[in-house]
Image (cartoon, helix red, strand yellow):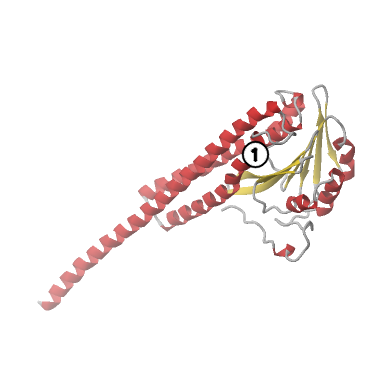
Amino acid sequence: MLRRATRRSSKAGLPPGTLVHIGKKRTEPVKLLLMEYDEQQFEERAIATPEGCFPFLDTPTITWLNITGVHDVAVIEKIGQHLHLHPLLLEDLVNTAQRPKIEDYQEYLFIVLKMLDYDDAGRVVIVEQISLILGKDYVVSFQEDEADVFDNVRNRIRSGTGRIRKTGADYLAYSLIDAIVDNYFTILEKVGDEVEEVEQELVTRPARETLEAIYRLKREMIALRRAVWPLREVVGSLQRGESPLIQEGTLIYLRDVYDHTVQIIDTIEGMRDVLSGMLDIYLSGLSNRMNEIMKVLTIFSTILIKTLHQ
């Protein structure tokens, strides 16, 4: 099943804007990877401290700062102070139980998304929170784990292929969102394969394990829906072009992401309907088997009664 969010009790009673990490406990150091580019040039470097990022965030070239690890609130606070981020935004950054959303702070946009991964060994879907800060000439991304789906975006920046080095920070933000959404299709294909296996098992040799698998998949569908459904609102807000940070040329690409989001939601709803039907079939089959058993027992009871009366 999907990883559950950590309880929020550690924040009870604290004033708004207090930075308390809510999520999986981690001790590894935060990693900062910075990419700076325009159409002619490109630089990539690992930064040791938050202060080392500040000169690059203030340049007119496009800067992408990817921060892996939101558990170190001191690092998040320093980045937030330099970019003049709102305290409530920083509070949401370190809370990994956020609902996907978008907030417009005029000078920058704050976007929260859920990135999915699939553990083939454990056959479970893993949810990771991704937060994006889109400014005029920069994008700062915050993620929980080092593994991500952004490698293709990085490779396009390195090689200079496509439009990404010829466009602004808004197109970079679109590319990151598009990578996350495209990965949803991959995850749903794997979950769909598992649904088909359970369906085949239901038809040929239903057992108690089949019922457990159906219930597990139904819980995963509920959690997937919770992670993906608000995404339509987020992308819809971006593709309407209400923020001056989104250029006209990027809107058509955001509309394409919106269409993909609707397809993903339809797929999830379809799988939920299939699983509900599978549960009904299992329970109906169980009831039929019980009826057959009761018929056999009734026949034996009748024979036994007649034998005793003779």
Instruction: Point out residue 251 in the picture as x, y percentages from the top left corner.
Output: 66, 30
Depth check: 231 or 38 in front? 231
Q: Residue at x 78, y 44 (%)?
A: 67
Q: Can residue 120 be seen in this view?
A: no
Q: Please, what secondary structure does the residue beneath circle 1 have?
A: helix
Q: Relative to 62, is 126 above or below?
A: below
Instruction: Point out residue 130 in the picture as x, y percentages from the top left corner.
Output: 70, 45
Q: What is the crowding at mark 1: few (fewer than 14 residues within 10 Å), some, or many (at least 20)?
A: some
Q: How many numbered tags mark residues here? A: 1
Instruction: Point out residue 269 in the picture as x, y percentages from the top left corner.
Output: 49, 44
Depth check: 203 or 157 in front? 157
Residue annotated with mark 1? 237
Q: Is residue 276 visible?
A: yes
Q: Which amino acid is tagged 1?
A: Ser
Q: Image quadrant of residue 57?
A: top right
65 lies left or right of 221: right
Q: Image quadrant of residue 54?
A: top right
View extreme (bottom): residue: 309
Q: Relative to 248, is 305 above or below?
A: below
Instruction: Point out residue 168 in the picture as x, y percentages from the top left corner.
Output: 76, 29
Q: Relative to 173, is 146 above or below?
A: below
Depth check: 217 or 165 in front? 165
Q: Residue at x 71, y 47 (%)?
A: 145
